[in-house]
Image (tube, rainbow, N blue to C red):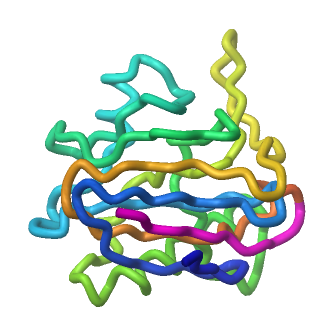
Amino acid sequence: MPHEIPPRSGTAFLLSQGQTLTVTDILGEQVADLLAFNRHDIGEVISSGRTLDYASKIYLSTGDLLYSNRSQVMLEIIADDVGRHDFLLTPCSKDTFRIIYGDTDPHRGCFGNLAAALAPHGVTEDMIPVAFNCFMNVPVDAATGELRVDPPLSKAGESITFRAHMDLIIGLTACSALQSNNGSFKPIAYTIDD
């Protein structure tokens, strides 16, 4: 049964080794920040640096592995309708909105949503790394290295599916940054299957 994450919010849940997680962009052009922690030792966490190093590329899709900070496989992408996700940019936060957008009363963003959702599992703010940003579209200029945040390529109903390689705690959001979601905030759905 699908679960729905309301716009600009987040959740946390358990995903057991061998189970699959499908993240679906219900309405299109909506990012979902995904974090993974080893359920039995939350000091082991998803690592953008390790993953991109071992993949030797920044755009990950079907067949690619997401590694932990201890070089263990946490998740494998087993299906992907979109083919463009981001693993470079950190979860948006109050500081993101203050520094980039100039907001005087900023939303807590994905960072705050993840921190609140993961707190019951013992995860503190300082333990939150760069997330795997499902559907986020960040082109990189090959000559200058400049990053640009463009609208997601995901269309309504498209999804990405992961298989867990260990028992995990997952944090997942419906992203709160206007630029990442082409100017509007929409829900995200997820399903877990054995």
Residue at 18% x, 69% y is 39
- Residue 120 pos. (x, y %): 29, 89
- Residue closer to the observer: 189 or 114: 189
Residue 61, placed above or below residue 3: above
- Residue 58 pos. (x, y %): 52, 27
Residue at 35% x, 34% y is 65
* Residue 34 falls left or right of residue 23: left
* Residue 8 falls left or right of residue 132: right
The answer to whether residue 94 shows anywhere in this view is no
- Residue 183 pos. (x, y %): 89, 62
Quarter assignment of residue 193:
bottom left
* Residue 148 falls left or right of residue 131: right
Image: magenta residue range: 183-194
- Residue 64 pos. (x, y %): 42, 30
Residue 63, placed above or below residue 154: above
The answer to whether residue 27 shows anywhere in this view is yes
